[in-house]
Image: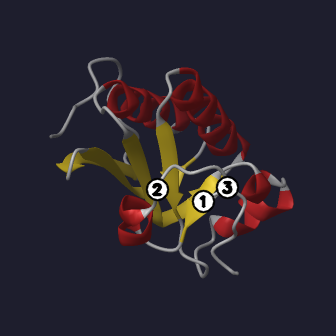
Amino acid sequence: MSHPSQAEPRPPDLDIVSRAVNGNIVVSVTGEVDTEAAPALHEAVITAIDGTASACVLDLTTVDFLDSAGLATLVTADAYAAAHKKSLRIAVDSNSPVIRPIEITGLDTVLRLYHTVGDALNASDRAGDGQGKSPRD
């Protein structure tokens, strides 16, 4: 299930694809999430959260760069999911350049991080499950 942006075209260094997997929606992101790309990511994740009854899995395993606008998008999307009684689970590989800015800002203790999309899909939403665990653990 792909939702092309109806606003502005996506930045050339960003690809976002959404698909349904066992009642959850997986948003796979490839490329760079910077100030120019963050609005497109925000739109895709909010649409996915609205379109699922349970969890949205954000796959950042093939993201090459994540700046402060991307980090802010993760925080905003996580708060949106919580406000709507849904779960945002983020898959980020321990070797990914994305994990470093997440850890430096302390967001690894706030966001639900998983090593793989499979781990995120198989997680439950019990308190503390996956939350605050760095993929480096």
Residue 3, placed above or below residue 33:
above
Left or right of 127 on screen, residue 56: left
- State the mark number for residue 76: none
In terms of secondary structure, where does tag 1 sit? loop
Left or right of 21 on screen, residue 73: right
CB atoms at circles 2 and 1 under 8 Å apart? yes
The amino acid at mark 2 is: Ser
Alpha carbons under labels 1 and 3: distance apart: 4 Å
CB atoms at circles 1 and 3 under 8 Å apart? yes
Q: Quadrant of residue 106?
A: bottom right
Q: Quadrant of residue 9?
A: top left
Residue 58: image x %, image y %? 44, 51
Tell me the residue that label 2 is attached to. 124
Question: For this rendering, which residue is in front, 66 or 75?
Answer: 75
Residue 25, placed above or below residue 10:
below
Tell me the residue that label 3 is attached to. 128
- Which residue, as the protein is rendered here, is positioned at the far left? 1
Which quarter shows the C terminus? bottom right
The amino acid at mark 1 is: Asp
Q: Residue at x 74, y 68 (%)?
A: 100
In terms of secondary structure, where does tag 2 sit? loop
The amino acid at mark 3 is: Gly
- State the mark number for residue 129: 1
Label 2, residues with CA under 10 Å away: few <14, some 14-19, many ≥20: few
Residue 128: image x %, image y %? 67, 55
Alpha carbons under labels 2 and 3: distance apart: 10 Å
Q: Residue at x 60, y 62 (%)?
A: 130
Alpha carbons under labels 2 and 1: distance apart: 7 Å
In terms of secondary structure, where does tag 3 sit? loop
Q: Residue at x 43, y 27 (%)?
A: 46
- Which residue, as the protein is rendered here, is positioned at the far top? 7
